[in-house]
Amino acid sequence: MPATDGPVLLYDGECGFCRAWVRQLVRVDGRGMLRFAPLQGAFAQVALRRCGLPLKDFESLVFLPEAEGEKYHLRTEGLIAALARLGGGWRVAARFIAVVPATWRNAVYNGVAGARYRIFGRVVYRDGELLDPKWAQRFLT
């Protein structure tokens, strides 16, 4: 699968919590279904513009079912969509999360997003920086 085909999860590349979750998703995604791109990077900025989303709102993860498409899912809907793509137990987890009303899920999500730098730290985002070189093909910058 070329790097720009298939689903992509856009995440805050400066958020320690977000990067830890991305590392975990890469580890559990043995089939390599998901690609990842930091919201601060060129790929994500083009995708955000294409989807009509704010270019500086780094408090929301964005899931793109197709890297070059205009369809997207934000916040917990994006998390649910990404987990469902992983299959197996992760798909089951996605279904359980989806049972919770979106207003409740997103209230928790927004609370964590608002406190994430204070609690989990901020890391320096550098364009082209990868979390681990062996995952290079999974990251779009």
Image (cartoon, rainbow, N blue to C red):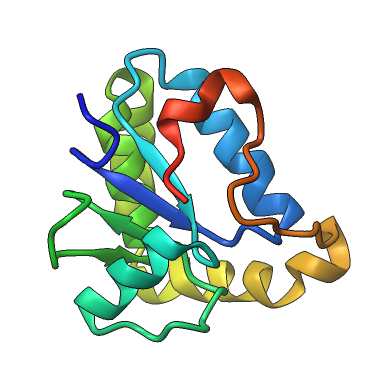
**On the picture, is 27 further left or further right than 71?**
right
Say which of 117 and 110 sits in front: 117
Residue at 65 percent across and 46 percent down: it is 19
- Place residue 30 in its image quadrant: top left
- Place residue 83 in its image quadrant: top left
Q: Specify whether residue 42 is in view.
A: yes
Whole-percent x, y for residue 77 in the image: 32, 60
**On the picture, is 38 further left or further right than 85?**
right
Say which of 51 and 84 sits in front: 51
Residue at 65 percent across and 27 percent down: it is 132
Split into 4 quadrants, where in the image is the N terminus? top left
**On the picture, is 42 further left or further right than 69?**
right
Give above or below for 18 relative to 47. Answer: above
User: Residue at the top extreme?
Assistant: 30
Whole-percent x, y for residue 28 in the image: 48, 20
Whole-percent x, y for residue 13 in the image: 62, 57
Residue at 86 percent across and 70 percent down: it is 118
Give above or below for 74 relative to 131. Answer: below
- Place residue 34 in its image quadrant: top left
Give above or below for 57 relative to 24. Answer: below
Residue at 85 percent across and 59 percent down: it is 121
Q: Specify whether residue 75 is in view.
A: no
Whole-percent x, y for residue 70 in the image: 14, 67
| Count of numbered circles in the view | 0
